[in-house]
Amino acid sequence: MADVRFENVSKSYGSNAPTIRNLDLHVRDGEFMVLVGPSGCGKSTTLRMVAGLEDVTSGTLSIGGRVVNEVAPKDRDIAMVFQNYALYPHMNVRENMAFGLKLRKFDRTEIEQRVREAATLLEIGELLERKPRELSGGQRQRVALGRAIVRKPQVFLFDEPLSNLDAKLRVQMRTEIKKLHRQLGTTMIYVTHDQVEAMTMGDRITVMKDGDVHQIDTPVALYNQPADIFVAGFIGSPSMNFIPARVIDDGSILLIADKRPITVPEEHRAFLADYRGQEVTLGLRPEHVRSTPDSCEYPAHMAMQHEMSELLGNEMYLYLSTDNLHITGRSNVVRQIEMDTAVDMYFDMAHAHYFEGASGTGRTLHVH
């Protein structure tokens, strides 16, 4: 096993602006690190630099304490699982899993032992004689995992490996990969654009945008203490509500869209007093916009217009509006609500987040 360390690493293509800028990231030995962000943020490029498929333009990249900037991919002792399974169609499962070891001149007995161990671990022992065309998508992905496992690498790299699977199978394979990590204890770096995948799988998560890292933290910390508006909006589904506001004299806030004052808890007023007269962004997650006040720690009433609902079985997400505001809330009371009717909602201000400015790009002003 080994850690992976990026020290001031940048990646550029020709004279273009850097795809990755001054990346400092330490993936600890045995950690499951997830790189997440929208398309084009640089997460796959970061992974490919670890694999040696992309050169490092500047900075230092090390694996297990060894600088690998100039080390060939085959000598880095890593294994990579791609979105495309890339199985050889003319080989059966056993031959696909063993192929890399044969190229490295492993003894036949050792190869057979490793293939058997991996097949047992992945519960595909009965599939060893089948060709890829005889397998389901989930089975093919297990074979691709097995091909990586038999190498017993220092580091596993996953580049959106579940993207080609249906929703139900993705959930199942997420569980299987996490179970695999616990059993092997090997360092794993996993790339995805799916924040639900990131939140359910990662020991820690690196949130990226436009080649920059916005925050590196545990899933719980990212959700409860986002570093800025981008992280707050990217992590969580449905997304956090962002409401432009202005801090008024008593440390409360005034919603800019409809000039509605909102009273905030005393500890928030003490903090916000330093921003009197300034514009801020109020952030509230949908679970903190509730249909009943008794489910809130510090409720602030808001009469809103009901636009539509999403029924999820034991709860509903409500899509609401008032003047220029569009808000997503949540109700534990499942009921039929007519379109365009007035509903009473309650902001739980005990769980409010505040971000600098009202433009939607600000850093967190207060972590509670």
Image (spheres, helix red, strand yellow):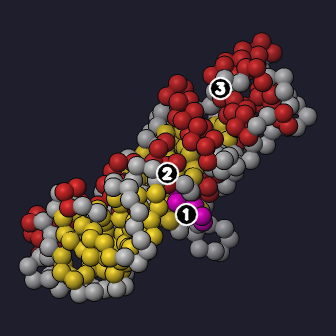
Q: Nearer the viewer, residue 62 or 51?
A: 51
- Which image quadrant is residue 334 in? bottom left
Q: Which residue is labeled 2 in the image? A: 196
Return the x and y of residue 145 as percentages of the image width and height.
Answer: 67, 34
- Span highlighted in magenta in the image: 36-42
N-terminal of the pair, mark 1 or mark 2, is 1
Q: Which residue is labeled 3 in the image? A: 122
Look at label 2 and name its amino acid: Val
Return the x and y of residue 21 as percentages of the image width and height.
Answer: 51, 65
Q: What secondary structure is marked by label 1?
A: loop
Look at label 1 and name its amino acid: Pro
Instruction: Kindly identify the residue that appears in the image at 35 percent across and 60 percent down.
Output: 330
State how far apart marks 2 and 3 are (Cα). 23 Å
Q: Residue furthest top?
A: 109
Q: What secondary structure is marked by label 2?
A: helix
Look at label 3 and name its amino acid: Leu
> Left or right: 99 with respect to 309?
right
Return the x and y of residue 42 as percentages of the image width and height.
Answer: 57, 61
> Left or right: 161 with respect to 303?
right
The reply to whether residue 215 is visible in this rendering is no
Q: Nearer the viewer, residue 82 or 171?
A: 171
Q: Which residue is labeled 1 in the image? A: 38
Please identify the quadrant where the C terminus is shown: bottom left
Q: Is residue 128 rendered magenta in the image? A: no
Q: Residues within 10 Å of mark 2 (few under 14, many from 20)?
A: few
Q: How many marks?
A: 3
